[in-house]
Image (cartoon, rainbow, N blue to C red):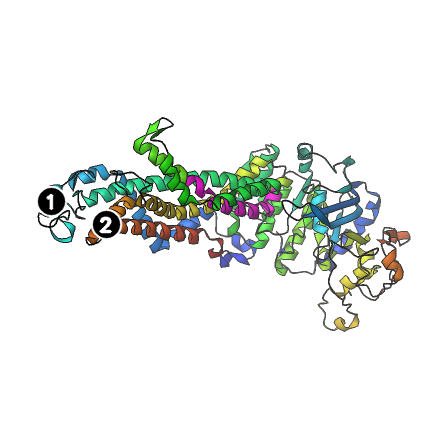
Amino acid sequence: MEDPSLSHADPEAVLVGEKQIEGRSLSQIAWGKLRRDKVALAGGAFIVFLILVAILAPLIVKITGGPPNAYHEDLLSPYIPNIPAGDFGGMSWRHPMGLETVSGRDIFSRVLYGARISLLIAILATMLSVAIGTTVGIIAGFFGGWVDAILSRIMDMFLAFPLLVFAIALSGVFPDKAFGFSGLPLRLGLLIFVIGFFNWPYIGRIVRGQTISLREREYVEAARSLGARRPYILFTELLPNLLAPILVYSTLIIPTNILFEAALSFLGVGIPPPTASWGGMLADAVTFYTVPHFMFWPGLAIFATVLAFNLFGDGLRDAFDPRGR
Amino acid sequence: MTTSETEPTPAVDTTTTPRHASRTPDRERENLLEVEDLVKHFPIKGGFLSGSKSAVQAVDGVSFTVRRGETFSIVGESGCGKSTTARLITRLLEPTAGKVTFEGKDITHLSDGRMRPLRRDIQMIFQDPYSSLNPRHTVGKIVGAPYKLQGVEPEGGRKKAVQALLQTVGLSPEHYNRYPHEFSGGQRQRIGIARTLALKPRLIVADEPVSALDVSIQAQVVNLLEDLQQELDLTYVMIAHDLSVVRHVSDRVAVMYLGKIVEIGDRDDLYDRPRHPYTVAMLSAVPVPDTKRRHQRERIRLQGDVPSPINPPTACRFHTRCWKAQEICRTEEPLLLQIGTGAESGHQVACHFPEEPSGPAGIPG
């Protein structure tokens, strides 16, 4: 719980010799713990690396294999139809991950551009979920009573929703032009909305539970006994205590959303070709299971990214865990 | 604080004499707080669709008055409604029925907005120092919150005022920027006390202020409260489940059982001449530090558990566990009536068969 040297000390003794010691806040302590957690740090470093690579993708591919949608049919095998020439799927310095079958597109470029799509959708969808979930969760937990009852049932309904079936059906019937958007931006918006809007109850439930538990703390009563109004209690007493769990669970929802986006693209209802996406690449690769490299690289990208987010999220949770203090 | 604070407990003998001398002439002091027939029932809800079926009768008709400058203690076991009473007085809970009058003003059903200015005068110390301080706020922010919430700008600025308060409760002004988790339980409780003092209240309701603390720290905090009372002319309503803790700070004591007051009396009357069987049993449970004298008194063990406040026993609520209970206790509720005469005229008890003044128990010494 606390520093053992402090816990039973005479108050006088504690006062001696500590003139200008700044207090360490809970966030500072959590950061200190996270810094010692090498596994979580490795996950975090990979995430930072991935985000940088995704942002710099257009520059990187200029040095390596060129744009993600450039065809290199000349590099396909002259003997076996549709298969890239050379070992390991045409691996070379110019094409470090080899080439796709049929089209000969550079896999490295496509994996980089796929990272952009994956991260963009996963992070924006998570932000949408967190925004809705936090708002609804706080309202349900703070006000309780029938407000809580209604909001909780709505959350249950959303959780019972057959999301995958809905997403497949929606992408089938959705027009090519809507809300002033068309093509890829519209598709991205649709995916972000579907993934983000139907996943908010997971955050909502956690925030609701935390709010209910915090609402009954005596410091909230203390604030009320001093004449605090509701906004003060909500934003000054409760919200700072909710930020840590919200941050932790957001980090853990991002990999779920990455997987979901990949699944939708794999099923052909996510990002439409020719835009590169990890799920779409896997779908293309399934037909050519005899050329395993095609499947390997996007699969590895998904695996490593999801693992990194999960490790980092777990580390974050451990660091913020009050029992570990 | 002074050295007396680090000494464990001999305060019982050292402090009673001067305090007692000053107490008697204050008999006729005006009432600061009057509580009449206060009732709080918590409805038990079945859920979203089903309506309320029954209610927890947490406080069921409690009346007492608190005089300016005194320490009034409410004692009872867990679940007897004493903490609920504290929250009704401070209007953290809305009373179901009854009346709370503070300085002649009826505050029973004041709206939040009209209650707000009055909150400067009525402050509360909480039981659990680990939960009563927001872990994400610095000590300065916690102790300074009263100024912010009441829009008060103290002379010389908030920071200076907060640091002065920290010194008042025996902490260092340098603790201003530290966080609650860096303090021990006793120090945390001091921070909580500093917060209640910020607005210079008249009445402080202390809800088990020391029960979460180590025994060695309890005396320090109790002594601090006592010193502050004399310095700042405070009135206390002290809630406790431990009779021995409040003994040396209380002027008057009320004993609660299952939402009702069973006995009220001046401190010495109640401790030396308990009348209600429940009080007698409670006093007999207080450990005696002297092993030689331990055998001299009878230990009364109550049978069974406290009945549920959802469905309390009829008439006298104590009859299910009372060794003196007779038929009338099951059918007719005993009223809280004056039992003493003369100097003991403040002694009231709610029992059909009160103990004789020279009762079997009481804390020896």
Q: Position of residue B216 (x, y in %)?
A: 62, 60
- Neighbor class of circle 2 (other Cα within 10 Å; few <14, some 14-19, many 20+) is few
Q: Position of residue A296 (x, y in %)?
A: 24, 52
- Write the start and end of the magenta stretch as one range: A196-222
Element type where label 1 sits in the image: helix
Circle 1 or circle 2, nearest the eye: 2
Instruction: Tell me the subunit letter for badge 2.
Output: A
Predominant secondary structure, magenta span: helix
Instruction: Tell me the subunit letter for badge 1.
Output: A
Residue at horizontal 79%, vertical 57%? B313
- Neighbor class of circle 1 (other Cα within 10 Å; few <14, some 14-19, many 20+) is some
Give the amino acid at mark 1. Answer: Leu
Say which of A15 and A236 sits in front.
Answer: A236
How far apart are labels 1 and 2 at the CA level? 20 Å
Residue A182, magenta (yes or no) = no
Position of B199 compared to B330: left or right? left
Please indicate, yes or no, whether residue B162 appears anywhere in the rendered image.
no
The image quadrant that residue A183 belongs to is top left
The residue tagged 1 is A75
The residue tagged 2 is A287
Vertical position of residue B267 compared to residue A254: above or below: below
Vertical position of residue B264 compared to residue B139: above or below: below
Say whether disc 1 or disc 2 marks the residue closer to the N-terminus.
1
Say which of A188 and B66 sits in front.
Answer: A188
Element type where label 2 sits in the image: loop
Q: Position of residue B303 (x, y in %)?
A: 76, 66
Give the amino acid at mark 2. Answer: Thr
Residue at horizontal 39%, vertical 38%? A170
User: Same chain, marks 1 and 2?
Assistant: yes
Q: Position of residue A257 (x, y in %)?
A: 37, 45
